[in-house]
Image: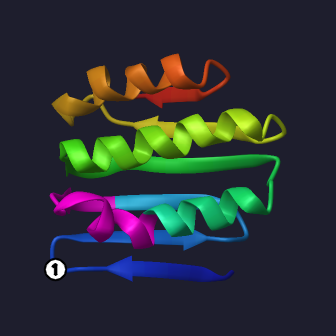
Amino acid sequence: MTIKEIKDQDYIVQYDSDANLVDFIGLFSLKGPKEYAPIAELLNKIAADEPEQMTLNLKKLEFLNSSGISMLSKFVLGLRKKKAIQLVILGSNKMSWQTKSLKNLQKFLPSLKLEID
């Protein structure tokens, strides 16, 4: 199992290359696109390999500010060009922001499989 990690005191992003799974954990209140760039680069690098399925697990993502939502939205929009990738986003009803915000991502990518529990 190969795991790549981006870490800060408030959050962790872990990528398991064997499962094409990216776990987002903690609070993301970074300031603008420059601070989100390492995360966006990781997501885009994974997508560049065009895996059959890519899963973003946001169940433990307590907060994502507007800059983070913008970064995630741009990533999802970019996947429209990569029709071979099935994007799965896992969310939690326990995180109130996820129910509304994650459903909006389906407008950008209708094939997105959203699982909120």
> Of 108 and 24, which appears nearest the observer?
108
Question: Compared to 98, does 22 lie above or below?
Answer: below
The residue positioned 67% from the left and 22% from the top of the image is: 111
The residue positioned 46% from the left and 49% from the top of the image is: 57
If the image is split into quadrants, where does the C terminus sit? top left
If the image is split into quadrants, where does the N terminus sit? bottom right
Q: Which residue is mark 1?
A: 9
Q: Position of residue 114 (x, y in %)?
A: 52, 27
> Of 73 and 24, which appears nearest the observer?
73
Q: Position of residue 82 (x, y in %)?
A: 77, 41
Left or right of 77 on screen, residue 57 = left
- Tell me the element at label 1: loop
The residue positioned 39% from the left and 21% from the top of the image is: 104
> Of 114 and 49, which appears nearest the observer?
49
Residue 59 occupies which quadrant of the picture?
Answer: top left
Q: Position of residue 61 (x, y in %)?
A: 28, 51
Q: Which residues are magenta?
A: 25-39
Instruction: Let me know if residue 37 is in the magenta part.
Output: yes
Residue 46 occupies which quadrant of the picture?
Answer: bottom right
Residue 28 occupies which quadrant of the picture?
Answer: bottom left
Q: Position of residue 7 (x, y in %)?
A: 32, 80
Left or right of 106 on screen, residue 72 = left
Q: How many marks?
A: 1
Instruction: Let me know if residue 78 is in the magenta part.
Output: no
- Callout 1 amino acid: Gln
Question: Compared to 24, does 74 lie above or below?
Answer: above
The residue positioned 28% from the left and 20% from the top of the image is: 100
Q: How is the image coloured?
A: rainbow
Left or right of 76 on screen, residue 94 = left
Label 1 CA crowd tier, 10 Å (few <14, some 14–19, many 20+): few
